[in-house]
Amino acid sequence: MGMVSSQLSISLDGYVAGPEQSQQDPLGRGGLRLHEWVFGLDTWRAQHGLSGGDRGVDADVVEEMTRDIGAYVMGRRMFGGGDGAWDESWQGWWGDDPPFRTPVFVLSHHPRAPLVMGGTEFRFVTDGIESALRQAREAAGDRRVSIAGGASTVRQYLAAGFVDTLQLHLVPIILGAGERLFDGIEPRLEQVSVVAGPTVTHLTYRVLR
Amino acid sequence: MGMVSSQLSISLDGYVAGPEQSQQDPLGRGGLRLHEWVFGLDTWRAQHGLSGGDRGVDADVVEEMTRDIGAYVMGRRMFGGGDGAWDESWQGWWGDDPPFRTPVFVLSHHPRAPLVMGGTEFRFVTDGIESALRQAREAAGDRRVSIAGGASTVRQYLAAGFVDTLQLHLVPIILGAGERLFDGIEPRLEQVSVVAGPTVTHLTYRVLR
């Protein structure tokens, strides 16, 4: 059975999103700064249907962390479209060909029919994180399942002991406020590998049971 | 003129001490876990008059970060002895031969005569952080000045723009509560070097002006 992993960009003071997150500003004030390291990379651009971009250590990390994923799980907020019953005109943030290209299991309290967009199929799961993970594992087979986010979804899976590997991209900024990855959870972590990019550091931890 | 540096062990959630710090428990609950990586190292043990210990990457980092220091500045809490006027029977936590072996400038609101202990001379400074740094620079000459701690002292020097290099030893533990290094300050940092030890990661940042 494949491993379950999660990867997040995190500030030096432990935030994975800025304050005042909203439908208009899903990463919160200043939160986009956590992800600036990734937007210029050739591997990230290729996954998003764009050409060109930078090669190097960061691009290699992005390629390696996405290469062997057979399914994703994400929270309702990461898929977007607001709270409550679905407005089915909302089809995510990623355009006609989302970068996942595997089944993506979206946690929700509200049922919705599967949605195929390019090579990605979004399936909406209403019976909890354990069911979503079981379905993702079945879809992924021997490949990995990635808990894609947002932070509260990753926190729930960490708290439940379902995550094998946590990768943090440590960005040397101070957000000062916002959403903290480790708010209320204290997973036991063991350092597995460290890769220094030019501006950020990629830390991989095994989550101990 | 020598550089001003500071180095601290920090948890993944941004704490440099645990909660409920006191004279009896100066690192707070769980705070000692931030420093466990250092106690077994041969370089640390030698600085504290002990023989034996582990060699390796962490020991090299400790040796390099302490090698070229010509003076230290520390806060009253780090020197210890409680608040208010000095009880002169208190001579610090470090025994007869403290590991600094340079002048150490201790910030205090209460005057006290210099205290020589082995190769270390503690000098007590009552006219503020800028004066302490100026005196430390004079004592250090071309060598570095280290802002030794505690966290609130490092924060004050960072906020005032007096620190050139910040080294963080990132320990993969979650403290959940306690004293946060970046509480109320947002220094602009640029990653200079990353060294992976077996259990912790040593991150060096330039503090931008």
Image: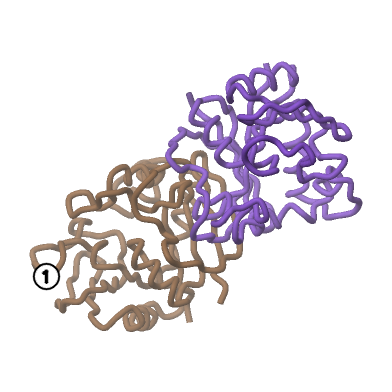
Chain colours: A purple, B brown
- Residue A117, placed above or below residue B147: above
Q: Nearer the viewer, residue B94 or B56?
A: B94
B200 sits left or right of B24 in the view: right
Kind of residue indicated by mark 1: Trp
Q: How packed is label 1: few (under 14 Cα within 10 Å), some, or many (20 or more)?
A: some
Name the residue rendered at 38%, 43% in the picture: B175
User: Of helix, strand and loop, which one carries label 1?
Assistant: loop
- Name the quadrant containing residue B117: bottom left
A123 sits left or right of B55 in the view: right
Q: Nearer the viewer, residue B170 or A38?
A: A38
Chain ID, mark 1: B
B193 sits left or right of B91 in the view: right
- Residue B16 visible within the image: yes
- Residue B192 visible within the image: no
- Residue A203, placed above or below residue A110: below
The N terminus of chain A - image quarter: top right
Q: Nearer the viewer, residue B188 or B203?
A: B188
The x, y position of residue B13, in whole percent, is: 46, 48
The x, y position of residue A40, in whole percent, is: 79, 56
A19 sits left or right of B80 in the view: right
Name the residue rendered at 24%, 63% in the picture: B77
**Outermost residue to the right:** A51
Residue hosting label 1 = B86
The x, y position of residue A97, in whole percent, is: 87, 40
What is the count of numbered marks?
1
- Residue A105, placed above or below residue B155: above
Q: Nearer the viewer, residue A28 or A24?
A: A24
Name the residue rendered at 31%, 68% in the picture: B74
The x, y position of residue B103, in whole percent, is: 29, 73
